[in-house]
Image (spheres, helix red, strand yellow):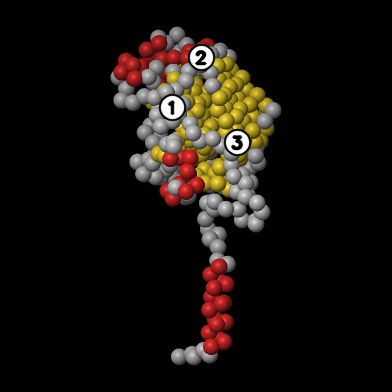
Amino acid sequence: MIKLNFLQSVFFVLLITLVSCNKTDDDSPHNNQNNNQNGTEEIFPDIDLNNWKVTLPIGDPLEIEPPEILNYANINVLKDYMFNDTDDGSLVFFTQPGTTTPNSSYSRTELREQLDPGSNNTNWTFAQGGNLDATLKVTTVSGPDGNKDRIIVLQIHGRLTDEQRDLIGEDDNNAPPVLKIYWDDGKINVRRKVLKDVDVNEEDMLRTDAWEDESHWFEQSVDFDQFDMSIEASENLLKVTLNDEELSFSDIHVEKWNVFENYFKAGNYLQSSDENSYAQVKFYNLVVTH
């Protein structure tokens, strides 16, 4: 047995302490620290969550609504999925395959708009209008270069009223998302719903299979850089803007969509079920007006 004198013992304890303090976890695909890492003044995100709930890829799945979500930085279950980066003042959404929501095969860490905080029952129509402005960037995503996993970062999702649900014999109030905005290998893909048959009657128009995706690409690439997006929805207009580039739709499909209620979604909806996939998205600004 090796015996240490007093000075040797003190030196040994200090050495072990220094090694322990400098150990880092380089294998983690995300950084869920609520404090900044560079010693500068902390910057906190200025995003109002009073009208948003979050869905996590855990539980059944787990959802946290207002007012509880307003204290997100101190909710332990959220710290791996929704947290502050006080180096750049962003609200970070991390996700990986786990629990899925009904009607989906993919997991998400995603906000859902609630006009009436704590309730999904109050929503808006295109006739009433809605506008969303966001500043965000994708920082981390799984997949090889040239074939990264896709992420839905923004949506307008449709919803059936109780009367519409009962009319067509559905089990829930789910309706198609009229707008999905994908980050797809550094470019932004916009998919909107259009009718397969514009002469369909109003009852059958409520059915999900009456609609299909129409795909549009912005010319510019965003890669892993910060970008601005805005969405404008009104009775006869659906407009999406990426930085200074615009896609605008005003046709019978937009007009017919007025049959549905809607709500905005924002966050990190990873389009992969591979057990090793993951993604991280940062939001610097998120404002909705009606």
* Mark 1 neighbour density, 10 Å: few (under 14) some (14–19) many (20 or more): some
Identify the element where label 2 is drawn: loop
Residue 283 sits in which quadrant? top right
- Residue 197 placement (x, y as % from top left): 45, 13
Q: Is residue 196 above or below residue 10?
A: above
Tag 1 residue: 116
Q: CA distance from mark 3 to mark 2?
A: 26 Å
Q: As rendered, which of 119 and 153 lies closer to the eye?
A: 119
Report the disc number at residue 160: none
Tag 2 residue: 127
Residue lying at 51% horizontally and 14% vertically, measured from the top left: 127
Q: As rendered, which of 198 and 10 lies closer to the eye?
A: 10
Residue 158 sits in which quadrant? top left
* Mark 3 neighbour density, 10 Å: few (under 14) some (14–19) many (20 or more): some
The residue sitting at the right extreme is 244
Q: CA distance from mark 3 to mark 1?
A: 21 Å
Tag 3 residue: 285
- Residue 98 placement (x, y as % from top left): 40, 45
Q: Is residue 67 above or below residue 84?
A: above
Q: Quarter of the image for the C terminus: give it.
A: top right
